[in-house]
Amino acid sequence: MSTTWKTLSDKLKSNEAKSYFEYVSESGKDSLYGYYDKAREAKTALRLNDADYGASAASLLSAGLSNSGYRDYLKSRADKSYRESLGIAEEAKKTDEYKNRSGYEKYLSDYDSVQKKISDSLIESIGKGNDFDFNRAYSKAVEAGLSDTMARITANRAILLAKNNTYLGAVAFAKANNLSAKKAKAYAKFLGLSEIYAERVYQEISTFTKEEKEFYSSMSAEDYYKYIMSKSKK
């Protein structure tokens, strides 16, 4: 595994992204705990200031105001304070939940970004070779830290690129060395290409005109490969 893959892989703590619960447990904030904690504080304050049973009730009783309008005022004020405290706790819970969701979305976005970078790097690397074995490509992808789904996608794309590049390389070699279509097909099979790709090489070489043969035979296989790659990008 190259340094690039290793550096990126170290950013992935596991082969699968964390669940929302795991993320909140490790990096978020328990919004319900905070809400219940503030709600308990509000309930305690309400009991202390209750005009019928709390400390305020004792003060009213000693002052002879237990059945006065002042008692009603204190009770109303305590109830209002309690409702306001619950409202503040609810807003704090919503804020914490929003931060958790936003943080988790960013985490997933970063995770996906790193996965894609690793995948692109692997596809480019494997695509330059002529190893068309899915299991080996898949194992490299998993080793690099990709999830199972991304590893399978990466392996398939890498092998397809490797086959296409090898096919183009076989055609380039055959044209530069003026091979017959039959020999070009045999060369393609020697490189490990399947019958389908080898037949494509055969068809490509068999349709050569005399002028094309003269033109391509003046190039090395490497130069011709660069030439056809530059044309395919236009």
Image (cartoon, rainbow, N blue to C red):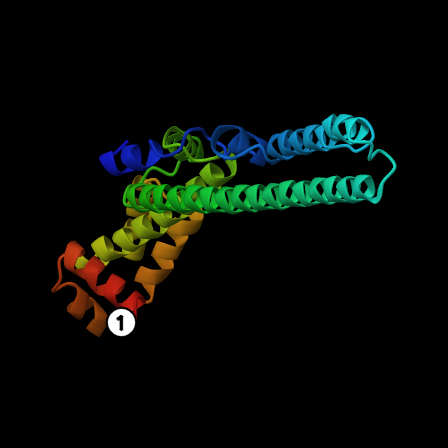
Residue 19 is drawn in which quadrant?
A: top right
Q: Residue at x 35, y 41 (%)?
A: 118
x then y, percent, for residue 223: 15, 59
Look at 30% across and 48% down and name the residue there: 166
* Residue 24: image location, x then y, percent: 54, 33
Return the residue at label 1.
209
Q: Nearer the viewer, residue 138 or 43?
A: 43
Please, which residue is most extreme toward the bottom here?
211
206 displayed left or right of 87:
left
Work out whether residue 18 or residue 3 is closer to the camera in this orientation and state it.
Answer: 18
Task: Identify the secondary structure beneath mark 1.
Answer: loop
Which quarter of the figure has residue 40? top right
Quarter of the image for the C terminus: give it: bottom left
Task: Look at the image and tell me whether residue 183 can be seen.
Answer: yes
Figure check: 63 above or below 226: above
Q: Amino acid at mark 1?
A: Thr
